[in-house]
Image (cartoon, rainbow, N blue to C red):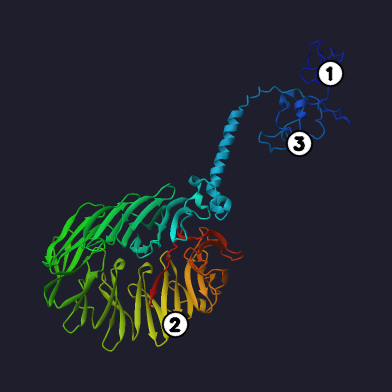
Amino acid sequence: MICPICGAKNREASKFCMRCGAALTSEGDKAPPSQPSQPQAPATSPPPPPTPPPSYQQPGYPPTARRYPAPPSEAEQGIPYVPPPQGWPQPGEATPSSSPYGPAYPQANQGAYVPTYAPVAQAPPKKRRPWLALVIGAGVIVVLLIAGFFVLPLIFPDVALFNNLALPSLLPEGQHALLGIIGRDERIDLYLLKMGRDFDKGVELAEEVEFSFYGEVDMRRQVGARSQAFGYMGGFVPDTKRLIYWYNEDEDLVLETIKVGEKAPSEMISSDAFPIYGVVYQDRNRVFFREARSDQERCYAGDFGEEAERVIKGDGCDVTGNGTFIFAKEWDYDDDEFSLTMIGIDGKDETVVLDAVESVEDMVVSYNGDTIAYVQEIDPDEQQLMCTSRSGEDAETIVDEVFAIDEFGFLDEAGSIVYYTVRDEDNVLSLYTTVASDALAETEYLYVIPALNRSIMIYLTEDSDGEEAVYAYDARADENVELLRADDLDFRVVDVLDKIFLRVRDDDEITLYSADMNGDNLVEILEESNVTSSEIIVDPRNTSMIFVRLRDEDSRWTLYAIPNNKSDPIRLMEEWHSLSLLNWSESAKLAIVAAIEDSGDDPELYTITLDRDADQVLLDNNQNDYINAVFSANEKSIFFTASTGDDTEDLAVFKVGIGGKEDPELLYDNTILLSVQWDELFNPLAYYWY
């Protein structure tokens, strides 16, 4: 049967054309009439398209989910045009192509499109694996939860929900604190916990122990060439997760350590001797202790987390400046003999440097322990200065047959440059070094401060007329520079800034200067009148700003901030009855000050902007006193300890926003904040009095 539309030959029983799908008439066995070479014009009202298969009618079914047959090839040109369904693109029109599967319809200029609506064969659907989807979904949820516990507390460290999550292993590091709960019997419970969390979520370090005040223990952190004290009962080792703390229990002094994340502390030393001096060397994971007893001193050393072992003992013992060697001194007063023994801080390589040397008056060990200098008396009116190496060999006489040597030391870490002062029978002092050919000064008064990291010596002289002068001597260049000369002059060396600060007083007027260690760049930084005392306040953590506090004749205080290396003072507070700079932040550009404006007023806690406006924001004025304060890790809040009453246990820890828009929040009652992991809390600032 011949199709009347396309002319294709079909079987006699066919009702539809196998090529185009048109209905076959009973006259389909006749050949179709000749067709025009061009498509006929479409009918005015084309018949509606056949209904698509049911799957195409499902809601939301994407039009690109199935494909229709390809458009006719060029070999099939001349086939009569059948118009596409209404709303479909017409030939020559651009077609949508945003589907990830490609265009749903033929692109422009690809020829006429003849839809047949015949079902398209599809691959059998893949078997679904619901268990795989469940596993993947569960994994995604776990990853999101873990990321949330790590990230959200960092973004929102002050939200109580995150602070009280009982998942310590997932909590971020760096926001822990040492706190003490104070009881009425003046005993204390020590806790390590994340700030803001409940005590039952932290680690109890000690229960009902006694305070061990600063003085009973002098624990220091060695940070490069700078030594910095821990707090009253302990503190965190800088840039680590390690906490070191101490307390009194049963008449013993106990020092322990714990690392954030550990469940229990480790004891380092327990002693009934007071006081104890200690130094932490974090670059070597090593701790040094010295306990003083009535008859001798004993020195201990140990690794973090391990009990310290006694290394050496003597009439006196100490550690070298860089913490590599421990040395013990022994005097035999009956025979007037002196011995010096040195041993590595690891307890190895013990060496007797000086063995029963007669008439040793004093001795000094260099910063790295390589050189030992000592003064030896030859007869009652004659002394000599000697130097030897750590091995005790190659002893050398530095100066011989002088009346007295008052002071001596080293100008470099290895001890290769020695300075010393010689006093004659008329009490005239002369200053020498082993690199200068002549005396640097001859005077009746001499005050010397060496700066080891620069091989520089700053010294002050005073002549018989009372005139004073300050000099900077560079040992490596062998240059001596006079900085200032005045009738009333004083200076301080601030190693952390590599600066010298000088004060000149003229009656009640003072002038402050700063200069480089070698004497260059002398700059006047402040001049004030009606001043009875002054002090430079420096932050070893941040050297971009220095502070100056002045007291006048009426005992009222004024506070300045001065950018380092600039003569540009900013007056923060003027003529207050009392004021104390507790802390400051360069990034937040704020200082925290506890102050009383007039006698009889209540203490107040402020933040002050470090700019010309010096805007003061009142944070709190409802406490008896303010003990300490520190910015939160994100510097949007401040934690502080305040005295809330007259009794010992009347202390509390509060939190307040830096803007002071809300009242302080009480975090812990009857509690003192002793140390925080992210910043300095105990004496974060260094004071240099004049």
Q: Which residue is denoted by mark 2 in the rendering?
A: 527
**Residue, far front:** 185
- Say which element carries label 2: strand
Crowding near the residue tagged with mark 1, few <14, some 14–19, many ≥20 C-alpha atoms within 10 Å: some
**Residue, far right:** 44
Judge by depth and name the residue closer to the eye, 196 or 453.
196
Q: Residue 420 has which mark?
A: none
Residue 679, position as x, y percentages in the image: 45, 60
Residue 615, position as x, y percentages in the image: 57, 72
Residue 44, position as x, y percentages in the image: 89, 31
- Label 3 or label 1, whichever lies nearer to me, is 1
Q: Which residue is denoted by mark 1 in the rendering?
A: 23
Tag 2 or tag 3, which sits nearer the N-term?
3
Residue 466, position as x, y percentages in the image: 29, 87
Q: Which residue is denoted by mark 3 in the rendering?
A: 92
The vertical placement of 421 against 300, above or below, is below
Q: Quadrant of the C terminus?
A: bottom left
Tag 2 or tag 1, which sits nearer the N-term?
1
Crowding near the residue tagged with mark 2, few <14, some 14–19, many ≥20 C-alpha atoms within 10 Å: some
> Residue 400, can we see it?
no
Please name the amino acid that badge 2 sits on.
Answer: Glu
At horizontal 83% and vertical 25% (from top left) the residue drawn is 36
- Label 3 or label 2, whichever lies nearer to me, is 2
Relative to 266, 149 lies left or right: right
Judge by depth and name the residue closer to the eye, 56 or 593.
593
The vertical placement of 521 against 635, above or below, is below
> Residue 273, can we see it?
yes
